[in-house]
Amino acid sequence: MVAATLSFVFPGAGQLYLGRRVSAVVFFVPALVAVLWAALQLSQGLVYFAVSLLDDTYALTVMVVAVAFTAWRVTSIAHPFLVVRPRRIGLRTGAVLALLLIATVGMGDVVFSNAFDAYSASRQIASNDFTDATQPETPDLWTPDPDWTFVLTGSGGPSSSPTEEISPTPGPTCPPSYMQAQRIPSNAFAAPAAASPEPSPSTPVPSPTVGPTESSSPLPSPTPEITPSPTPEITPSPTPEITPSPTPEITPSPSPTGGPGSPTRLTVVLVGVDFMAGRSHALTDSLMLVSVDLQTRAVAMVSVPRDTSAFPFYWGGQAPDNFKINALANAIAAGRFGSPDPPLVTLANEIGFLVGVKIDYYAEIDMDGFKQMIDLIGGVDINNPSVLNDPFTCTYVPAGLVHLDGSMALRYVRSRESTNDYSRASRQQIVLMALEKKMATPAMLPKLGSLLALAGKSIATNFPLKTAKDYVYTAEHISSIAHCVLGPPYNFHPDSKLTNGTWTSRLKLDQVANLSVQFFGTESRYYGQPGVVPAPCQNRF
């Protein structure tokens, strides 16, 4: 029994204890090689190793090593009983031996299962596509589910008026208490950013009369409280000073060779797909460009409003006045507009073309998967810049440091009735930054298998997952994050009479050009164009 226990600790130790030196060497050397190989794989950290598993070839290698090493350990443990001193195994000895073998197989199974989950996830992610372009679009309606988690079923504009796209039917009557985000003690993090006035923390449930945006009745008004209207300050002529046109620098699709587009920058378009139970189609309602300077590790995030219309195509021509960019992938799949690229590649390249930087890859996630992922990692902590008080979805998020679980995070990034689409896009950026920060920690490793299984069902991308490990250091050492939403003053709302009553917005590309050069410098396609002056984000909403 002592020999078996020693062999459990390390193959060959039990044989050496019994004086069988040759057998000890035979079991010890292969095990030592396997351990040294594992140590080499872990030498760059557990997070690096976990991300490396997204390379399906590497994951297969880890599975083979895990099975071989486990089998070798089992043989080494059983060897003293079966070969060295063959004898009948008693009940007590057999129980101990069984426990040793079960523990050995269990330890190997942990490694094998995680590698298998990574292998399955990487192959599934590469084949996922959550957009169903064959289904017709439906009107913009709000539909609460029994858990008060709202479902947006269309493509309405920011705080559109009821006469345009949002049904005039009042929202649901809130339950006795709002769904309220959990506060984080003020000493848990650095001091919060300046925030809007809010109810006292001692108040357990916000009163319907408290908060800068809440109505005086638990039933919200059918008319959104913030209705954008053009003003002289933010409503210029529909014709921007700079009209971009396709240039040789804009590559229609990510290059499969030469790494992530360029040696100094990685740029990905993140697409949030509104594809949930009860939906007849999927729209790309969250459009966010994330670009990382791989030398300085500075991140730039730019959100493009989903109702952007009349935008120039990177392959030539222009979208119709009442056609929104969140339906572009569907339209391309249906054979409209003549794009040279597949639907999601077209959408990603179009976002990059408008913002002014070359796109390398796209990634899309369905909203239900987003909710589950945040719950799986135990929620995220954010510094909310201002109170979110939405009586229509019965959601209240105080200003300052708060903790969001999956359901609250989903409400937080989708609510627009008491604010608008531009504020919603800004909140999406806040949650994304919090999610990235928490995911890039060793504390997530015990949940690796579950996270990978969920990713396989919820994420689609053309990013080569086998290269993901190359960006682990950058993700763990971000130097700065600059973010902006292309709402006012970067866009304007044209008269809806010109779009048959459809709420749309249009980009002011001269303003976008200034921001692009500020964020991307000489890598911006607007760089060097007449009248372009770098300018930081100037969001006004």
Image (tube, rainbow, N blue to C red):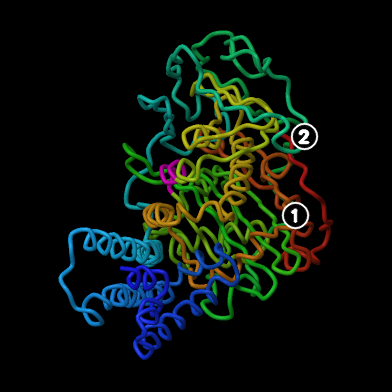
Q: Which residue is mark 1?
A: 480
x and y percentages locating residue 332 in the rendered image: 43, 58
Q: Residue at x 65, y 14 (%)?
A: 202
Question: What element does badge 2 sit on?
Answer: loop
- Local secondary structure at mark 1: strand
Could you say which quadrant of the image residue 196 lies in?
Answer: top right
Q: Locate residue 495: give its quadrant.
A: top right
Q: Using the image as rendered, state which of residue 363 and residue 371 is in the foreground.
A: 371
- The secondary structure that dominates the magenta segment is helix
| Residue shown at 55% from the left, 49% from the top | 287
Q: Amino acid at mark 2?
A: Ala
Outermost residue toward the left in this view: 88
Query: Which of marks 1 and 2 precedes in the sequence?
Result: 2
* 324 in relation to 77, above or below: above
| Residue 360 in the figure: left or right of residue 509 | left
Above or below, 192 against 324 in this view is above
- Badge 2, how many Cα within 10 Å: few under 14, some, many 20+? few
Image coordinates of residue 497 in percent, x first then y, are: 55, 33
Q: Amino acid at mark 1?
A: Ser
- Residue 370 magenta-highlighted: yes
Label placed on residue 191: 2
- The region drawn magenta spans 366-372
Residue that appears at 39% across and 80% down: 12
Image quadrant for the C terminus?
top right
In the rendered image, the quadrant that contains the N terminus is bottom left
